[in-house]
Structure formats: structure tokens, C-alpha cells
Image (cartoon, rainbow, N blue to C red):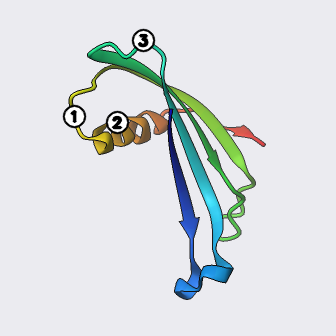
């Protein structure tokens, strides 16, 4: 499993750091050269937009594993564009 953590560090002050989102990506096809992945994405409440905490689950299919990890992260982000979010 790959875990991405988005942290906000206001003014670069470590003591003010807080997690604003996470992404857990799991290979669901036995590590095949071209694999399918399930990603669970969670976002904290956003005071600027007024959105509450939310999450979604997306699937990335037929991803070539012989690429940069960022290609997989980008594919998950692209899949999030059409995702339905649940309030948490």
C-alpha cells in the first residue's frame, strides 16, 4: 500500500502542522505488470470553502507499474475528478 499524506505547515512552523488530506492506494491485482488499484482519499474540513470532511474511493485500471510513482498518484487524482464524495 502507498500512503500519501498532505500536511499544511502554516508559516513553516512545525508546531502548527496539521493533516489536511490522505490518500491510501492499494494494488488489487496481485502486482501484475499492468495492475488495478483502489484508492481511498480523505480530506479534512476546509474553512475557506465551507466544506466538511469528506472521502471518496476510486479505481485506477490497467496502470503500467513500470512508471514513476507520481504517474500512479496523477492517475488517482484524475479519477477523483468524477468521483462521488461522502461526508465523513
In percent of the image, x 54 and y 88: which residue is there? 11
User: Distance between the Cα atoms at labels 1 and 2?
Assistant: 8 Å
- State the image quarter where residue 19 is shown: bottom right
Q: Is residue 12 above or below residue 55?
A: below
What residue is shown with label 2?
Answer: 72
Instruction: Give yes or no for contact between labels 1 and 2 (Cβ–Cβ under 8 Å).
Output: yes
- Mark 3 or 2: the one toward you: 3
Q: Which residue is at the front of the view, 52 or 73?
A: 73
In the structure shown, which secondary structural element does the residue marked by tag 1 occupy? loop
User: Distance between the Cα atoms at labels 3 and 1?
Assistant: 17 Å
- Mark 3 or 1: the one toward you: 3
What residue is shown with label 1?
Answer: 67
Q: Which residue is at the front of the view, 12 or 78?
A: 12
What residue is shown with label 3?
Answer: 30
Question: Residue 21's spot in the image, x, y percent?
Answer: 60, 54
User: Distance between the Cα atoms at labels 3 and 2?
Assistant: 16 Å
Instruction: Give yes or no for contact between labels 3 and 1 (Cβ–Cβ under 8 Å).
Output: no
In percent of the image, x 38 and y 41: which residue is there? 73
In percent of the image, x 37 and y 16: which residue is there? 31
Quarter of the picture holding the C terminus: top right
Callout 2 environment at 10 Å: few (<14), some (14 to 19), or many (20+)?
Answer: some
- Left or right: residue 26 versus residue 69 is right
Q: Is residue 37 above or below residue 39?
A: above
| Disc nearer the start of the sequence (3/2) | 3
In percent of the image, x 67 and y 81: which residue is there? 15
| Disc nearer the start of the sequence (3/1) | 3
Callout 3 environment at 10 Å: few (<14), some (14 to 19), or many (20+)?
Answer: few
- State the image quarter where residue 24 is shown: top right
Question: Residue 48's spot in the image, x, y percent?
Answer: 65, 71
Question: Residue 33's spot in the image, x, y percent?
Answer: 26, 16
| Disc nearer the start of the sequence (1/2) | 1
- Left or right: residue 78 versus residue 38 is left
Amino acid at each position: 500500500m502507498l500512503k500519501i499524506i498532505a500536511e499544511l505547515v502554516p508559516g513553516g512552523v512545525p508546531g502548527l502542522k496539521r493533516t489536511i488530506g490522505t490518500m491510501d492506494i492499494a494494488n488489487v491485482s496481485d502486482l501484475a505488470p499492468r495492475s488495478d488499484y483502489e484508492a481511498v482519499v480523505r480530506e479534512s474540513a476546509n474553512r475557506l470553502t465551507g466544506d466538511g470532511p469528506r472521502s471518496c474511493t476510486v479505481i485506477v485500471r490497467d496502470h503500467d507499474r513500470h512508471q514513476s510513482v507520481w504517474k500512479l498518484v496523477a492517475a488517482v487524482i484524475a479519477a477523483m475528478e468524477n468521483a462521488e464524495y461522502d461526508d465523513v
